[in-house]
Amino acid sequence: MDALLDGLNPAQKSAVTNPASVVQVLAPPGSGKTKTLTSRVAYLINHNRLQPWNIIVCTFTIKAAREMKERIRGFVGEGIEAKLILGTFHSVARRFLVRYGNHIGIEKNFGIADTSDTLAIIKRIVKRQRYGVEPGVARSRISGLKARSTSVEQFAATNKKAEQHEFAALYAEYEETLKTSNLLDYDDLLLRCTDLLRKHPECVSSIQAVLIDEFQDTNHVQYELMTLLSQKQKCITIVGDPDQSIYGFRSAEIKNLKLMREHHPETVVIHLENNYRSSGCILTSALAVIEQDESRHNKPLLPTHVVGERPVLRKLPNAVAEAKWLVSEIQRSKTLTGEIFTFNDYAILLRSAALSRLIETQLGKAGIPYRMVGGHRFYDRVEVKLVLDYLRVVNQPDHNDALVRIINNPPRKIGEVTVKALLEEAEAQKMTLWDLVLNQAQGRKRPRTKLSAQAEKGIDMFVNLILTSRKKLLNEDGKDCSLVDIIAHVLNKLSFQEFLRKTYREEWEGRWANVEELVAQATDVALSTEAGDNALDESLPVVEGIEQRTLSSGDILTKFLSNVALSTEVEKKDGQRAEQVTISTIHAAKGLEWPVVFIPAAYEGSIPHSRSEDTDEERRLLYVGMTRAQALLYLSCPTKNSQREQTTISPFVTPKNVARSFDIRGPSFGFQTTQDLSHILRRACPAGSIIQHARTLVEHVEDDVYPLDGEDIDPESNYWDIDDQYSDAFPSDFPSKRRKFE
Ligand code: ATP
Ligand code: MG
C-alpha cells in the first residue's frame, strides 16, 4: 500500500501501523527500532492524516535527531518534516517554553545559560556575598537540587544551619539573577516545561502523538515530561532496548519501561528479532558479551546478513603503538579497497573521552581529518587548557594571552579590573605583562596600577611559581629536571588536584584523569626524544651537531607544546571537510552505525571503568559499542596503559568468546592483497555504499579461500601469549603462522 511499508518485516509493519494508543517496541540493536519509529511518524502523517505539528518526537542526541529528520523527509516530502516537533528533550522543552512560557512568567526571548555562563554568574554572587565557597561546587549543588525539583523556598524551609542559610541566599540570588537576565539553565528547561504543562494542559491540546527513541535512557523528569506532553491525547510510541541502557549514572530509570506498562495497562508490546545492521560474526561476538549478564532475559537476535569477517582483537605493546596501528589500519583498509571506504565510514569509539589524545595526535600526523563527537577535543578541555597555559608561560613568560588567563586562575585575589589595568599599563609602557608583574614582585619598579595588599600577595605567589618552574626548566639549580618533574612542580604548587576537587565536586576525577593523561603525553614526548625517536613530532627539525640526548627540558617542552598546537591545527584546518573519521564516546554513539568501528583500550579499568560501580552497565556499554559496526569491527588493547601500568584485557571479552568469534591471528582480517579484501567485502554485511562497490569489485575473485567458522579453535589455549608474538603490526611471516589455527 504505502511505499513506506515496503521492505519492512511483519513485526516492523505491525509496529508502524498498530492502531493501539500505547505501543512499546522492545528490540535489540540494529533491528530497525529507529527505522520503525520514523516510519510510524510518516504513517501517522500519510495515513492517519495527522499534521506534522501534532506530533512530538524525542531523541537523545542532536545527531540522532538530524538523522531521523532525514529519514522522515524521504517519506513525507520536503518541508513537511521541518514542521514536526522533533528534537532532544531539551530542545522540545525549549520550544514549548518559547511558545507558551508567558503563562508561567517566562518571557519569549529567554536565553539559555550554558555551563560557563552559570559559573560566571555564581562567581560574581560568591564575590559579592563574600561567601567562602568554590563557585563550581555551588553550581553542582544547585543543579542537584533543581534535578530533584527542590526550590529555594523548599530548601530553606528544611535546612536551617548557618552554612545552609548562606547557601540558600546564594541559590536565591542565582535564581533571581537568571530571572532578571531572562535566562534558563539546562535544568530549568525540563523542569519549567513540566511546570508549564501541569498548570496549563491546554498547551498540548494540539498534540496527538508522542514518540520517543532510546526510551531505556529516560530519567524521572523526562518520563514526567512524556506523560504531560501526551495528557490530552494518549498516543505514545516508545522504542527501546533494556540491554542498551547506559545512562544509569545520570539517573536514567530503566524501570520507566515497566512503569509505563503499569500506568497504561493497554500497552501493546512488540518485539523485533532480525538484525539488519551487522554481519553475523559481529553479532556473535557482541552477543557473547551481553549474554554474560545473567539477570538478562535472553532474546533472539537473528542476523540477516552474511557471516562476514570475524572481528579483530589485537594486543599492542602500548597505547602509542595502539594508536599508530589503528591509524595504519584505517589507511591500509582504505587503500586496499581502492577507496571504497571514505573516512566517513570509520568510527573510533571510546569508553572515556580522555582516551582520544593519542589517537588525535596520530590521526593529525597522518593528515586524516576527524571530528570529535560527544565531548570537547582533549586539548580544549578547561583543565587541560589551564595546565597547558601554565606550561606556555613557564616556557615563554611573555606569552601575554596565556598569562592573562592564568594569573588569577586558580584564584589569587587579583581581580579582573586589576588584571585589565595591569595589562593596559604594560601596553602603555611597551613592556610585557610578565615584566610588569616581575618588577612588582621583585620590588624594583612598582606598577602605577593600584594594588590591594591581597593582590600584591597573589602576584608574589604567581611570579614565584613561574620563576621556580623556569629555574627547573633551564636547569639553573644544577639538578637534572625532566619535563614531567616540571609539570609535577607546577601542579603541586597549584594544589591542582585539590583545586579540581573543590571546583568540580562530582566531576573532579574525570578532569584529574585528563590532567594525568596530559602528563602521560609529556612523558611520551620526553621518552621518545631520549630514545632518539622523533616520531611524535616529525616537524621538529633535527639540529645538526646536537645529539637528541642533549636536548634540554626546555626543548622538550617546546616540542610538547608544538605537538599540541599541531593537533589543534589539523582539527581546525579540516573542520569544514565533509569526509572525516568520527571519534566519539560510546555514550554519544548510541543509535548510530558505521561500516568500520574501532574500540581501542578494551582493557580492565577502561571498560569496565575503574571508577564505575555498575559492571552490568559497563558491559552493556561495550555491547552498544560493538553493535555500531556494520562490516568490520576491531577491538584492541595496549599491554600497558598510558600511565605505563600493565593491563589485562576487558573481562567482558572472555577466552571462550574470543575462540568463538574473534580473529586474533595477527594482522587484521588476514587480508594482505586487494583480492583478499574484496573477498572479505563480499562476505561482509552489505552496508550502504560498500556493498555496491564491493559487488563490482568481487566479480573477478575466486571462490572461498579461508574457512570462516572457527569452531575448531581450542577455547582453552592461551590466546594472549600467542597474540603477543604478533605485537608488530604486520609481521611479514604472517600467513604461515595463520595456518596453525585453520
Ligand atoms: P539501535 O538499537 O542501535 O538504535 P535500531 O533498532 O534503532 O538500532 P535502526 O537504526 O533503525 O536500528 O536500523 C539499523 C539498520 O538496519 C539501518 O541501516 C536500517 O536502515 C536497517 N534496516 C532496518 N530495518 C530494515 C529492513 N526491514 N530491511 C532492510 N534494512 C533495514
Ligand atoms: Mg535506534
Image (spheres, rainbow, N blue to C red):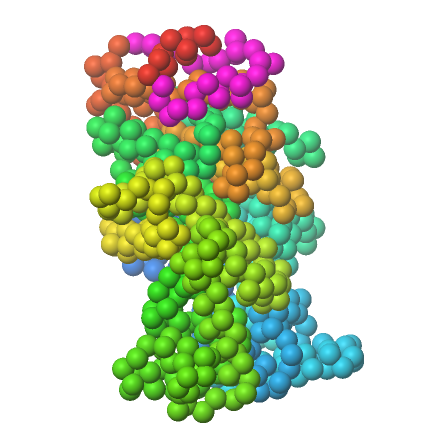
For the point 48% across and 21% down, the residue is 724
User: Is 539 a magenta residue?
Assistant: no
261 to the left or right of 567: right
Q: In which quarter of the image is the N terminus?
A: top left
Q: Which of 246 and 739 is in front in this view?
A: 739
Relative to 529, residue 199 above or below: below
2 to the left or right of 658: left
Relative to 16, residue 711 above or below: above
Q: Is residue 682 visible?
A: no
Percent from the top left, x then y, of residue 291? 61, 29
Percent from the top left, x then y, of residue 239? 53, 46
Percent from the top left, x then y, of residue 351? 51, 43
Percent from the top left, x then y, of residue 187? 56, 68
Q: Which of 37 and 434 is in front in this view?
A: 434
Q: Which of 461 and 107 is in front in this view?
A: 461
For the point 76% across and 82% down, the residue is 162
Relative to 138, residue 715 above or below: above
For the point 50% across and 17% down, the residue is 722
Q: Quadrant of the C terminus?
A: top left
For the point 56% across and 61% down, the residue is 492
429 to the left or right of 389: left
User: Is 711 a magenta residue?
Assistant: yes
Dominant secondary structure of the residues highlighted in magenta in the image: loop
Q: Can residue 135 be seen in this view?
A: yes
- Tell me which segment is drawn in magenta: 703-731
Q: Nearer the viewer, residue 225 or 587?
A: 587
Relative to 674, residue 139 above or below: below
Residue farthest toward the front in the current orientation of the protein: 478
